[in-house]
């Protein structure tokens, strides 16, 4: 579907009074800790990133989006900006984008990230129609970055000091290149921190512009309680305007930012977060959409039909089992799996294929398929053993954890491989 990409109020100031945006708070976890960020407190009167009145699951976010558009049809942009980082919550982020693509393909899709975890998902971003991505880059010198970030987490490893800042910077710069190669519009958010990076802002602009970034947004530090930077002053116009002029020599500048919350909704100059707070919180209590669908069967990922011994993403087909009228269990049929390599949509297709199943038994399952299946009221069980033993636990009850896989090295990572494990 053709989208009018000029209707993004953050990237086009001329539309800020006509077009609105909604931030869907589906990403609670973060993979870095900035010395100005504290996400503990929520005041509905406070407008700053990291603040939200609730966290939504993807299917709840899709329902919330429906209600928001009913109340504010001027919304043209659906974005995810936290309250953590979208790619510390990649499965939730991509599934939300997929659902929005199905329901509201006319909307502009936007993501705001620190850039640490985005690289494995660039193709998915493009395939899902995300046209605008903001990356927060406040330093392009690891020595300065080390003063801004308390730590950076890469997988299960936490890095501090210049090493952490260096890893983050490498990912951020690679993300700009990768996004521009895929035709995505890139905005750089740079936090102006007195005594830390004021003299470095123009260099951030120069480096990012050289990689193809489209626009930069200088955001004055908002001192927040219980953070290392809580005692620093908030920069005023006398500080920001000269910096904006210097950076503007390299890249276009955004001048109308409202430092939006992670659940911001409405026009930039007419935010309705308070008015829709109750709607958001009500949606956060919704149950999975297909909970009442009859589910007499169980799907099994197996190589030879005796053991549960195949990763969910590797299975080319699933055995479908049900209870037998004479007692025990019977094999109903063998059902083909969706083709590998079609990204997040594959797991929605799998959920549709298994909509008569209450559970799926497999040797390993990635976070993305687990999330989608659970939202369709299909419970993935990671087990190791005979099919009959596992079926007994599902149909008759008991602690299926007794059959949980305990061998090391089994599992599917977030990004997945050729088998589509992610």
Image: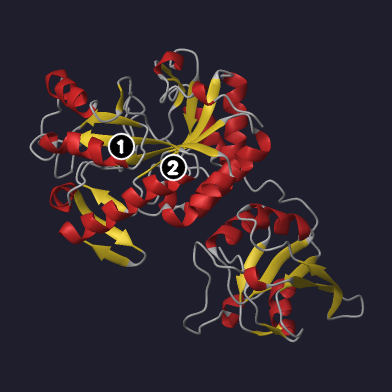
Q: Residue at x 70, y 66 (%)?
A: 359
* Relative image position of residue 77 (x, y in whole percent): 52, 28
Residue 304 at x, y percent in the picture: 75, 85
Q: Quadrant of the C terminus?
A: bottom right
Quadrant of residue 222 within the rendered picture: top left
Q: Is residue 230 visible?
A: no
Quadrant position of residue 152 = bottom left
| CB atoms of marks 1 and 2 within 8 Å | no
Q: Secondary structure at mark 2?
A: helix
Disc assigned to residue 85: none
Vertically, is 406 above or below 34?
Answer: below
| Residue depicted at 49% across the width and 21% down the height | 20
What residue is pinned by disc 2? 180
Instruction: Give the camera-side residue of 128 and 384.
Output: 128
- Examine the rendered structure and indicate whether residue 273 appears above or below residue 184: above
Q: Is residue 229 left or right of residue 88?
A: left
Q: State the separation of the CA atoms marked 1 and 2.
A: 11 Å
Which of the colour schemes (rainbow, by chain, secondary structure, one colour) is used?
A: secondary structure
Q: Which label belongs to residue 209?
A: 1
Instruction: Give the mark count.
Output: 2
Q: Position of residue 76 (x, y in %)?
A: 54, 24
At horizontal 51% and vertical 21% (from top left) the residue drawn is 7
| Residue drawn at point x = 54 percent, y = 65 percent | 416
Look at the picture and state if 142 lies above or below 133: below
Rendering coords of residue 207 (x, y %): 25, 41
Q: Is residue 163 left or right of residue 381?
A: left
């Amino acid at each position: 579907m053709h989208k009018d990409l000029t209707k993004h109020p953050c990237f086009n100031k001329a539309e800020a009074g006509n077009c609105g945006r909604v931030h869907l708070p589906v990403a609670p976890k973060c993979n870095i800790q900035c010395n100005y960020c504290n996400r503990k407190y929520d005041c509905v009167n406070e407008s700053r990133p990291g603040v939200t009145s609730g966290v939504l699951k993807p299917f709840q976010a899709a329902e919330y989006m429906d209600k928001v558009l009913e109340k504010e049809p001027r919304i043209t942009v659906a974005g995810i900006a936290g309250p953590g980082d979208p790619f510390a919550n990649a499965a939730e982020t991509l599934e939300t984008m997929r659902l929005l693509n199905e329901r509201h393909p006319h909307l502009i899709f936007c993501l705001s990230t620190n850039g640490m975890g985005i690289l494995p998902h660039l193709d998915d971003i493009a395939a899902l129609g995300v046209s605008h991505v903001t990356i927060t880059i406040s330093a392009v010198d690891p020595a300065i970055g080390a003063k801004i970030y308390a730590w950076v987490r890469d997988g299960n490893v936490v890095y501090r000091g210049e090493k952490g800042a260096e890893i983050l910077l490498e990912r951020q710069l690679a993300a700009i290149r990768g996004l521009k190669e895929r035709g995505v519009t890139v905005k750089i958010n740079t936090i102006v921190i007195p005594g830390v990076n004021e003299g470095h802002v123009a260099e951030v602009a120069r480096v990012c512009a050289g990689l193809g970034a489209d626009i930069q947004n200088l955001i004055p530090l908002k001192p927040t309680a219980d953070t290392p930077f809580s005692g620093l002053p908030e920069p005023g116009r006398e500080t920001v305007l000269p910096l904006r002029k210097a950076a503007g020599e390299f890249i276009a500048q955004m001048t109308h930012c409202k430092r939006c919350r992670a659940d911001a909704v409405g026009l930039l100059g007419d935010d309705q977060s308070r008015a829709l707070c109750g709607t958001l919180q009500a949606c956060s209590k919704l149950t999975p959409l297909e909970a009442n669908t009859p589910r007499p069967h169980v799907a099994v990922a197996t190589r030879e039909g005796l053991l549960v011994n195949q990763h969910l993403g590797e299975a080319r087909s699933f055995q479908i089992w049900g209870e037998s009228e004479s007692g025990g269990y019977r094999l109903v049929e063998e059902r083909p799996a969706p083709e590998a390599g079609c990204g997040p949509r594959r797991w929605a297709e799998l959920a549709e294929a298994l909509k008569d199943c209450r559970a799926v038994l497999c040797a390993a399952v990635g976070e993305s398929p687990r999330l989608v299946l659970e939202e369709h009221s299909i419970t993935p069980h990671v087990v190791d053993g005979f099919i009959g033993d596992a079926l007994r636990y599902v149909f008759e009850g008991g602690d299926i954890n007794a059959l949980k896989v305990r061998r090391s090295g089994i599992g599917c990572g977030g990004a997945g491989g050729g088998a589509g494990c992610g």
